[in-house]
């Protein structure tokens, strides 16, 4: 089964041979350390993808505000075209959402005050940035991406920055129609770090196809989320990055991967990976072990 087919069928809840594998972010420096190369290139990326037997690639604009994998050395449009034309991977484009852009524009303190004191300005600003996100998403999908991941960190370790009621009024109600518009062209996933348990039903109502992240250190329990929303959302991620520290024993890592995989693969609609991506300082040995264990545990 080709990687694209494996991911596409998984998102739609259809039968596949094994759980697909993918990461939100893969730092080129980590690729180079893994392959023992000094210079990163498209060819090196392909070698890395084959080594880890990944099924999807997430591409981001290197000039954007979000940190993503610049896996080709050029602009987002060029990278999408090359990966689409020369590989069989499922291609996601990573775009910064309206919440994150508004927060960066206003600053955290003014943003939080504006919820009560500048509500109209806040809504107008978030709407403007959301429309910009939609244009970028449409461009990526028109350019060959199979889907987009909207990155909007709306939460911290203990919960969402705003109450569910405020998020519904200021954010989710605003993006609902936009997500439907984007879904007419491809798959749409949502990403947020932190504890978003209290708004998972909103993500379903908005119409997202999937959710990437599921940070276990913030209280995101994969098995619980799968039980409640596994029929509505394709879930991606969840393995805690702390398990990739070289001090973690092989046995502990093996147990964690098996547990994560078992919770995710039950009923399908799961893509294995870490909750936050492969950053440059991670242990290469631990990452290779993780994906080896995942391959063994991911067979249906």
Image: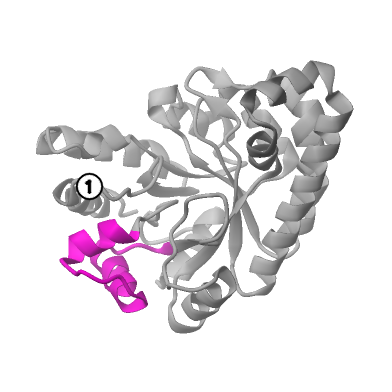
In the image: residue 58, left or right of residue 210:
left
Residue in the foreground of this view, choosing between 259 and 15? 259
Query: Can you say whether 22 is above or below 198 in the image?
Result: below
Q: Quadrant of the N terminus?
A: bottom left
Query: Can you say whether 165 is above or below 244 in the image?
Result: above
In the image: residue 116, left or right of residue 264:
right
Query: Can you say whether 116 is above or below 18 in the image?
Result: above
**Around disc 1, counting alpha carbons within 10 Å, would you say few (fewer than 14), some (14 to 19), or many (20 or more)?**
many
Instruction: Give, as a single range, the part of the protein colored magenta.
Output: 28-56
The residue that disc 1 covers is 290
Residue in the foreground of this view, choosing between 119 and 145? 119
Residue in the foreground of this view, choosing between 212 and 131? 131
Residue 48, percent across and down?
A: 27, 67
Q: Is residue 23 magenta?
A: no
Residue 238, percent across and down?
A: 40, 37
At 56% across and 69% down in the image, what residue appears?
Answer: 76
Q: What is the chief secondary structure element of the magenta stretch?
A: helix
Secondary structure, mark 1, is helix
């Amino acid at each position: 089964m080709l990687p694209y087919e494996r991911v596409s069928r998984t998102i739609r809840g259809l039968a596949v041979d094994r759980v697909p594998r993918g990461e939100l972010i893969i730092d080129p420096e980590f690729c180079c350390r893994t392959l023992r190369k000094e210079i990163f290139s498209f060819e090196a990326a392909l070698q890395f993808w084959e080594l880890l037997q990944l099924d999807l690639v997430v591409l981001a604009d290197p000039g954007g505000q979000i940190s993503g994998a610049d896996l080709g050395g050029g602009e987002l449009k060029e990278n999408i075209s090359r990966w689409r034309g020369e590989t069989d991977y499922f291609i996601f484009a990573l775009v910064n959402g309206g919440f994150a852009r508004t927060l960066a524009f206003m600053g955290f303190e003014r943003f939080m005050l504006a919820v009560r004191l500048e509500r109209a300005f806040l809504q107008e600003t978030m709407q403007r940035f959301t429309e910009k996100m939609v244009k970028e998403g449409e461009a990526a999908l028109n350019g060959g991406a199979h889907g987009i991941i909207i990155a909007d960190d709306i939460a911290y370790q203990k919960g969402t920055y705003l109450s569910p009621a405020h998020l519904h009024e200021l954010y989710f109600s605003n993006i609902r129609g936009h997500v439907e518009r984007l879904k007419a062209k491809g798959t749409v996933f949502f990403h947020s770090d932190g504890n978003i348990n209290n708004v998972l039903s909103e993500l379903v109502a908005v119409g997202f196809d999937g959710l990437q992240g599921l940070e276990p250190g913030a209280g995101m329990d994969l098995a619980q989320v799968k039980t409640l929303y596994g029929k509505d959302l394709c879930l991606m991620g969840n393995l805690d990055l702390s398990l990739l520290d070289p001090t973690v024993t092989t046995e502990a890592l093996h147990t964690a991967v098996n547990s994560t995989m078992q919770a995710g693969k039950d009923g399908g609609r799961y893509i294995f990976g870490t909750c936050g991506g492969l950053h440059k300082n991670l242990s290469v040995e631990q990452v290779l072990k993780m994906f080896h264990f995942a391959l063994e545990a991911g067979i249906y």
